[in-house]
Amino acid sequence: MIYSKSTIKNIADSIGVPKLKDGITTAMAQDVEYRLHEIIAEAMKFMRHSKRTKLTVSDINSALRVRNVEPIYGFETGRPIKFHKTATALEEIYYVDDELIDLDKLMEEPLPSVPLEVVYTAHWLAIEGVQPRIQQNPAPIDEEEPAAKKTAKAPQRQDGVETIPLVKHVLSKELQLYFECITESLVSPDPLVKSTALESISIDAGIHQLVTYFVQYVAMTVKNNLNNLDTLRTAMAVANALRRNPNLFVEPYMHQLIPSLLTCLVSKRLCESYTEDHWSLRDGAAEQIAEICQQFGQSYHTLQARIARTLLRAFLDPTKPLTTHYGAIVGLTKLGVSIIKVLVLPNIKTYMSLLDAEMEKRDNQQLINDGAHCQTALMNVLRALARDCDDIEPLGLTIPQKGKLAEVVGDTLTRLVFADPDAGKIAAAVVAASKEAKVQESPK
């Protein structure tokens, strides 16, 4: 027995419990020995998990905390503990010398400084794969460059102001090869190669670092190829593929993508000959703009309003060509019925009078063709109103009803409406929407 009965009796006497029976002291000594073995075994586990071979006071304290026992105070130190041995009449005792502290000297020493309060700050480790050069982040390890290149990239001073170059966006060689391969495939005459490249952009999950490069590719392609219809179609297809990739975060780049889409929507000329089908390109651009407004309208509340204002100015400007008017009408139509009721419908009659006068002035086949497409776009506006009013009762096709419709859309468009198979429903929806707009505009 490592814990003797006499020790138990001495401790009992010290706390005011004298004359314990031998049976009690024996049972308590065995229990203390068991508890000591248990604590030591638990401490050995902490020692082994710490990859050490020497048992320390911290291991014992950890074992005591696990057993919900108050740890030992005053023995944990970074210095090695030296035990001294002394002999008594019964046994040898090991002890540790207590350090002598001069209280006068301790009282004269200055008080330690008050510790700072804990403060939490947040910063970006990386943004779109680029590490910001801030104090909290480690300095980037750039590849060794020749001295001439380092001199060329040194900060420039203008009027005493030091300009620091932006953080480089470093691409891996694999991504560079991928981008070059995709851009080469997009200009390939083989439709299969081009469609494969677009499919890769729309589903690949590892190209998030290339989003800004593809957005710039779309912008530069639209800017430099305004008379090349096929190239513009490819640029619009790339923009659509980027937006539809569920693995990419393209929201920060929408403000760079929208100008390219608007250019393909309301640009004066998108091809060499007016006989080419540039109208479908404008329709596709309008569809993409409407999808962007629907997808990001909750994050950017003024997005749809700004786009609608831009298209309305293009629609109402008589100096703009009819191709621009067509794109503006289609774009406003795709934005929804509420935009049609507020912005397009009140201006249709005035616009049709100007369009009729313009088409009568010149005997030009291109002008007649463009005007016909504008009339078709306005008919689609009226059909969109009719589709929104499913439960409306069709209007009778009588002369008074024609007069009511002509007051809203003009004589030319009225004739086109009454030539449509759903003329009654379209006329009823237009007249009802016009009355609703007048009620909203009238003062309360």
Image (tube, rainbow, N blue to C red):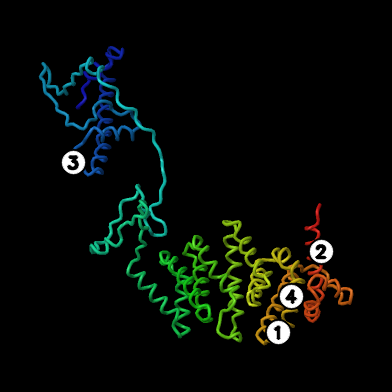
Picture disc at residue 400: none
- The x and y percentages for residue 301 are 60, 56
Instruction: Please name the residue shown 64% across and 67% down the image.
Output: 311
Instruction: Tell me how far mark 2 sits from mark 1, CA to CA.
Output: 36 Å
Q: Label 3 neighbourhood size at 10 Å, few (<14), some (14-19), many (20+)?
A: few
Residue beneath label 1, please? 362
Label 1 is placed on what type of residue?
A: Arg
Label 2 is placed on what type of residue?
A: Lys
Task: Left or right? Give the position of 66 relative to 403.
Answer: left
Label 3 is placed on what type of residue?
A: Thr
Picture quadrant where residue 307 is located = bottom right
Closest to the observer, 103 or 368? 368
Residue beneath label 3, please? 53
User: Which numbered mark, 2 or 1, is in the foreground of this view?
Assistant: 1
User: Which numbered mark, 4 or 3, is in the foreground of this view?
Assistant: 4
- Furthest residue toward front: 159
2 or 3: tag closer to the N-terminus: 3
- In the rendered image, the quadrant that contains the N terminus is top left
Q: Label 2 neighbourhood size at 10 Å, few (<14), some (14-19), many (20+)?
A: few
